[in-house]
Image (cartoon, coloured by chain):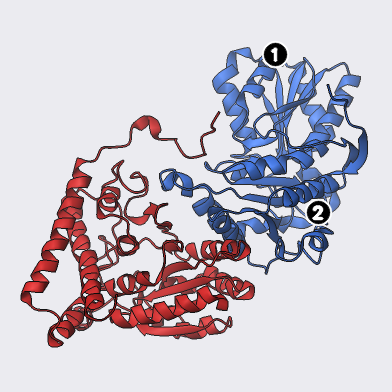
Chain colours: A red, B blue
């Protein structure tokens, strides 16, 4: 897919994430979704643009802010929504909720709520592929907060030392929960940290879906070709609070509003309109299609059941087969 | 009927190495990684010679990055491999505790049963070598607190030889604790020694008067204590738990219901340890079978100190076991 078709597809994908999450926020207020809910609103261009570069044989690891990644990876909206509800029909059978979406069919390995905890796993995934001579890539998404964790440094060093086909995708939304990057990093140039491990690194405007798609495509191709691991920083911004419990005392409303003007959907919509690729009717058609999908997802989740209590201890260990 | 194969003289270390060699030969998905497992030959020389035999891809020296290489083991296991990760001592494994507890132990249940983590982590444990408070602790009881992982503690040559393959074929993460004092343990091992079960406790010595329940590095001490007790007319049964999670409760209850007296010997600290858990299970399931309160011999609640006299005093010893068992046997309701 290229040109106008690709552009409209990218817009649609970003809208799928946005509308899905707006619905989640609403359902959270209605008490249908509990626990933590971390919205990705504002960062849609990253998952929408980056995920396209991967094939079905590749593996994806993500964070607790992963609804968008799960949708972009191709997990149906229904099982994702059912997971948010904690229903048995959820993709993790309701066991994980918002933060722990897993899906074997699309090789989506979570859904990790320990910051930085997915990076060592990614090294192991990629090592397995290298040892088995499989031309696969392991993509690991994480936020800039993870860069402060020891596991980030251990993992980048190990991945580079062993030249494994891992792609480290850093979503730099400038805040680790409420701590601004300049208040947590002595050097805020994240690519420099990756390069210090002899790892190729690039920084991309994470609000520009086309730039994200292009940069990730290049990086995936190079990693798949056997060039060793790479690091990509997506400079982005979270429009909503960290979670539904966050009063946002750490940043100004003006700052958020300024970033919203650069929002990935609003700017891309304007661009497509100015290029004559999008008009009101086309946009309405996309919105209607997305709304239909989300309504069906909610319906699927509502219709779902609860895992029977007697299953509580099931799958702590693998059941022995006779 | 096959004839029993000839026994040969070997050590615990060699038995472990033979198990590693067999696993590497039998399954191309198996590889070993850890600090100094390759060129150095393993900090306890367990993997000595394997690098030359299997090459750098499968015998992988790692940087001192416990969290990354244990996590990489989990990732590789999720992606189809059967990794063996060696952590130099269980004290160092705390640097990888996040990966073990938050990932290895949770992923199967949290993903609704979609993924297993067929990983084996080996680590040295225990005191007795004057290595002081950051190389001598016994954390197998701690790890046994965590659902989702399996804890095995080979204490004999047969188990050193046979537990690894069974652990590797187990779809869930298994941590194997090797008491460092056992590496030089010598004895006879059948030439055809092979995989053993990792589900059941074993009665290492049968007896009727008191049950000594133990595992790992304390098994030898309990057997020596049982010899001494026999000299005094006390016939002790010795149970080697072998696996600390899941515990073979049935074996414990069955023995204690017969001997009606028990002493638990555990190199972990006393408070909140595996010995306490075993006592609780006996209370829950065999209270009315007992003729005396159960006793335990554990490590003193101190960081293990360097000087020999203090270290000896801090961990279970034969004399303490004999003394405690004698007291329990002499107790009359």
Q: Disc 2: which chain?
A: B
- The residue at 45%/86% (across/down) is A189
User: x and y percent of residue B98 in the render?
Assistant: 53, 57
Q: Is residue B90 visible?
A: yes
Q: Disc 1: which chain?
A: B
Residue B258's disc is 1
Between marks 1 and 2 in the image, the one whose residue lies nearer the viewer: 2
* Residue sitting nearer the eye, A28 or B115: B115
Number of labels in the image equals 2
Q: CB of mark 1 within 8 Å of CB of mark 2? A: no
The C terminus of chain A is located in which quarter?
top right
Dot 2: within a 10 Å radius of its alpha carbon, few (fewer than 14), some, or many (20 or more) residues?
some
Q: Is residue A188 visible?
A: no
**In the structure shown, which secondary structural element does the residue marked by tag 1 occupy?**
helix
**In the structure shown, which secondary structural element does the residue marked by tag 2 occupy?**
loop
Residue B46's disc is 2
- The residue at 82%/17% (across/down) is B235
- The residue at 25%/60% (across/down) is A244
- The residue at 76%/61% (across/down) is B37
The N terminus of chain A is located in which quarter?
bottom left
> Does residue B309 appear left or right of residue B150 in this picture?
right
* Residue sitting nearer the eye, A61 or B257: A61
Identify the image quadrant of residue A307. top left
């Amino acid at each position: 897919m290229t040109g106008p078709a690709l552009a409209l597809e990218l817009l649609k994908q970003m809208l799928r994430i946005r509308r899905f999450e707006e619905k989640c926020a609403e359902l959270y207020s209605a008490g249908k979704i509990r626990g933590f809910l971390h919205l990705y609103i504002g960062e849609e261009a990253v998952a929408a643009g980056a995920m396209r570069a991967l094939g079905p044989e590749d593996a994806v690891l993500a964070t607790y802010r992963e609804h968008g990644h799960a949708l972009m990876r191709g997990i149906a909206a229904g099982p994702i929504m059912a997971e948010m509800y904690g229903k048995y029909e959820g993709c993790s059978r309701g066991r994980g909720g918002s933060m722990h979406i897993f899906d074997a069919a699309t090789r989506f390995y979570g859904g990790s709520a320990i910051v930085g905890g997915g990076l060592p796993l990614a090294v192991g995934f990629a090592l397995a592929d290298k040892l088995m001579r499989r031309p696969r890539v392991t993509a690991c998404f994480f936020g800039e907060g993870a860069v402060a964790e020891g596991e980030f440094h251990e993992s980048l060093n190990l991945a580079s030392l062993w030249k494994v086909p891992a792609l480290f995708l850093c979503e730099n939304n400038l805040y680790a929960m409420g701590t601004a990057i300049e208040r947590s990093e002595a050097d805020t140039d994240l690519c420099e940290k990756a390069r210090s491990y002899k790892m190729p690194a690039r920084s991309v405007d994470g609000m520009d879906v086309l730039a994200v798609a292009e940069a990730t495509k290049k990086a995936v191709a190079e990693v798949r070709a056997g060039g060793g691991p790479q690091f990509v920083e997506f400079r982005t911004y979270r429009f909503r609070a960290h979670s539904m419990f966050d009063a946002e005392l750490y940043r100004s409303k003006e700052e958020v509003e300024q970033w919203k003007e650069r929002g990935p959907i609003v700017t891309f919509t304007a661009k497509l309109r100015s290029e004559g690729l999008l008009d009101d009717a086309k946009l309405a058609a996309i919105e209607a299609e997305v709304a239909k999908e989300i309504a069906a997802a909610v319906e699927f989740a509502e219709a779902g059941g609860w895992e029977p209590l007697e299953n509580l201890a099931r799958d702590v260990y693998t059941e022995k087969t006779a | 009927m096959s004839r029993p194969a000839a026994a040969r003289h070997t050590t615990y270390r060699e038995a472990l190495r033979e198990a590693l060699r067999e696993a590497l030969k039998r399954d191309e998905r198996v590889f070993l990684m850890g600090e100094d497992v390759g060129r150095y030959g393993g900090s306890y020389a367990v993997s000595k010679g394997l690098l030359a035999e299997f090459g750098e891809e499968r015998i992988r020296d790692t940087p001192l990055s416990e969290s990354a290489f244990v996590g990489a083991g989990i990732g590789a296991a999720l992606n189809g491999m059967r990794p063996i990760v060696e952590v130099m001592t269980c004290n160092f494994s705390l640097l990888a505790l996040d990966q073990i507890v938050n990932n290895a132990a949770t992923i199967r249940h949290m993903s609704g049963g979609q993924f297993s983590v067929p990983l084996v982590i080996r680590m040295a444990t225990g005191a007795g070598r004057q290595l002081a408070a950051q190389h001598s602790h016994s954390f197998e009881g701690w790890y046994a607190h965590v659902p989702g992982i399996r804890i095995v503690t080979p204490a004999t040559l047969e188990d050193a030889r046979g537990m690894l393959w069974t652990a590797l074929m187990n779809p869930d993460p298994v941590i194997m604790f090797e008491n460092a004092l056992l590496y030089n343990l010598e004895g006879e091992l059948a030439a055809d020694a092979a995989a053993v079960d990792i589900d059941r406790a074993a009665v290492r010595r049968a007896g009727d008067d008191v049950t000594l329940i133990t595992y790992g590095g304390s098994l030898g001490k309990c057997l020596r204590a049982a010899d001494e007790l026999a000299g005094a007319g006390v016939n002790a049964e010795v149970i080697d738990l072998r696996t600390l999670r899941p515990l073979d409760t049935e074996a414990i209850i069955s023995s204690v219901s017969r001997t009606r007296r028990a002493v638990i010997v555990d190199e972990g600290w006393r408070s909140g340890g595996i010995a306490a858990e075993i006592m609780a299970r006996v209370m829950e399931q065999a209270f009315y079978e007992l003729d005396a309160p159960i006793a335990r011999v554990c490590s003193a609640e101190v960081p293990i100190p360097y000087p020999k006299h203090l270290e000896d005093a801090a961990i279970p010893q034969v004399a303490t076991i004999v003394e405690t068992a004698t007291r329990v046997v002499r107790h009359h309701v």
